[in-house]
């Protein structure tokens, strides 16, 4: 019997502890000092982000490290090219859920827009630089979207619609992602100035946008060179 990679074992062990941590924080932190609440919620958000569903599902399904194929990332787009549509759909749901859960916990326990923004940025950092995979994870689009959907649903819808439109037109998932993120950040700004939601969410919009565009810098370079993979092209072994 082939022994699964250590990183799979560690994450499989970590998942029930993270779930228990979420429950414990929700049940016990009400009424505690804000410093204690931050100290409980934010490390939990990072660990939640660090669970790399794309990596685990491709390992379980195919016995390969998704980081050795295509873009070398663990997110949905690379899983789609490497592991197929069903695995990608599962990763899409679970990666969005990470952002949603982090913001919901921050809202329930701390109850400020600043805490929501901090948790959303930290879970995004965990997804992109996960402790369980030597800090090499995904690009963060879906996890960022999950957090934004709770804080500012209308900009999240606008960003998603932009992504689909640009991706359908160009056949580049990366281009749709980058432009969708930028339009989403502008929508957060515009709607905050219009009084639709907290101005604090503008901080998330622009910091998350900067992080996500930075994570796509290699895609941007390949688009400029004409070597970026289009939607539907399978992943090849990374050199």
Image (cartoon, rainbow, N blue to C red):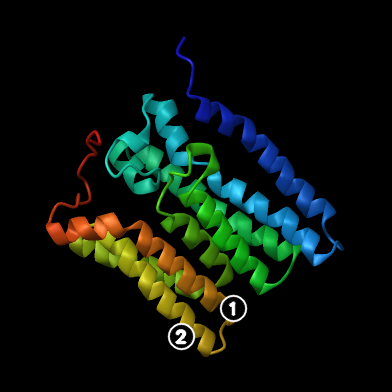
Which residue is the extreme one toward the left?
226
Q: CA distance from mark 1 to mark 2?
A: 13 Å
**Rendered residue at 43%/36% (across/down):** 55
Asked if residue 238 lies left or right of residue 56, the reply is left
**Rendered residue at 69%/65% (across/down):** 107
8, 36: nearer the viewer: 36
Against 203, is 32 above or below?
above
Q: Which residue is mark 1?
A: 200
Residue 235 appears in which quarter of the rendering? top left
Residue 72 appears in which quarter of the rendering? top left
Q: Residues within 10 Å of mark 1 (few under 14, many from 20)?
A: some
Q: Which residue is mark 2?
A: 190
- The image position of residue 39, as x and y in percent, is 74, 56
**Rendered residue at 43%/63% (across/down):** 211
Which residue is the extreme one toward the bottom?
194
14, 210: nearer the viewer: 210
Residue 17 appears in which quarter of the rendering? top right
Asked if residue 80 lies left or right of residue 193, the reply is left
Q: Nearer the viewer, mark 1 or mark 2?
A: 1
């Amino acid at each position: 019997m082939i022994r699964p990679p250590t990183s799979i074992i560690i994450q499989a062990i970590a998942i029930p502890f993270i779930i228990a941590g979420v429950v414990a924080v929700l049940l016990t932190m009400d009424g505690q000092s804000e410093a204690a609440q931050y100290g409980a919620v934010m490390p939990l958000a990072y660990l939640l982000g660090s669970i790399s569903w794309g990596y685990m599902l491709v390992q379980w399904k195919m016995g390969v490290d998704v980081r050795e194929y295509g873009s070398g990332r663990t997110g949905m787009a690379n899983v789609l090219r490497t592991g197929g549509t069903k695995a990608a759909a599962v990763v899409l749901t679970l990666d969005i859920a990470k952002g949603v859960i982090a913001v919901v916990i921050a809202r329930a326990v701390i109850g400020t827009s600043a805490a929501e923004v901090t948790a959303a940025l930290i879970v995004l950092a965990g997804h992109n630089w996960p402790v369980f995979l030597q800090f090499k994870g995904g690009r963060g689009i879906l996890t960022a979207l999950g957090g934004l959907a709770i804080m500012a649903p209308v900009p999240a819808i606008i960003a998603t619609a932009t992504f689909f439109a640009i991706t359908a037109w160009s056949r580049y998932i990366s281009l749709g992602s980058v432009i969708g993120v930028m339009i989403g950040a502008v929508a957060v700004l515009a709607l905050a100035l219009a009084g639709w939601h907290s101005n604090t969410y503008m901080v998330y919009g622009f910091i998350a946008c900067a992080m996500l565009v930075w994570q796509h810098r290699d895609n941007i370079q390949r688009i400029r060179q004409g070597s970026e993979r289009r939607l539907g092209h399978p992943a090849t072994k990374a050199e």
